[in-house]
Amino acid sequence: MEFIVEKIGMSRTVSVPSVPVTLLKVLDTKVCEIAENSKAIVAFASGKKFNKAIEGQQKKYNISKEFNRFATMTVANTEAGDLDVSGLSEAKVLKSTFKTKGRGFAGGMKRWNFAGGPKSHGSRFHRAVGSIGNAEWPGRVQPGKKMPGHYGNTNVSLKNEVISFDVETGILVVKGSIAGPNGALGKVKVAK
């Protein structure tokens, strides 16, 4: 069973020793149509995106205006309606998939934790990558060389232990950290 969640932020438990936890809010999700092998088309609210295609889907499945995003995922429901979240109450381990923070084009020191050169006067090697090639043989830069480039904005999946789940508020508390900024949307899947 999969659920669409929003990352609220991080905190810790009051117990001794305290445990670092991440708070996730399970979004209000409508199951629109159920296909074979418990896959379903679901709708959820995210931002203000609206166009003719979304409007057509809303009329087809008879759902209100705020449900403007659609996804295909595995659900516990047997018929259309509100998403069944009862599976989270018994869950022990979740697999979460979120996008990491996008950092754009980043240098070698930020992207790969390179040390850089001396910071003193006279040095011309502060934050540059340094030598990247070799001599006459093989006479080229090796594939996979750590260099400046696009950093972040990649999917990261983690397994996290479930600490608690409040059915009324939809707040899910998992042990450890989860990729992405606060407010990011992602998927969680019951692993155990």
Image (cartoon, rainbow, N blue to C red):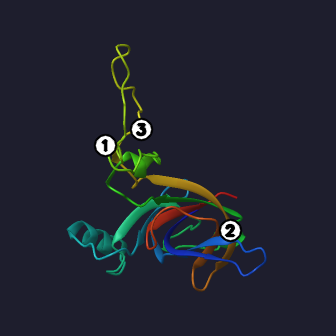
Three-letter amino acid code of the residue under disc 2: Val
Is residue 39 shown to the viewer in this render?
no
Measure the C-alpha gap from mark 1 to mark 2.
Answer: 51 Å
Image location of residue 59, percent across then percent down: 30, 74
Mark 2, residue position: 162
Viewer-side label of 3, 2: 3
Mark 1, residue position: 124
Q: Based on the displayed image, in which of its 4 quarters is residue 133 positioned?
A: top left
- Height in image: 145 above or below 49? above
Look at the image and tell me in which quarter the C terminus lies: bottom right
Three-letter amino acid code of the residue under disc 3: Lys
29 vs 164, left or right, is left
Image point (68%, 68%), residue name: 162
Viewer-side label of 1, 3: 1
Image point (64%, 69%), residue name: 174
Labelled disc at residue 146:
3
**CB-based contact (under 8 Å), mark 1 and mark 3:** no
Three-letter amino acid code of the residue under disc 1: Arg
- Mark 2 Cα shell of 10 Å, populated few (<14), some (14-19), many (≥20): many
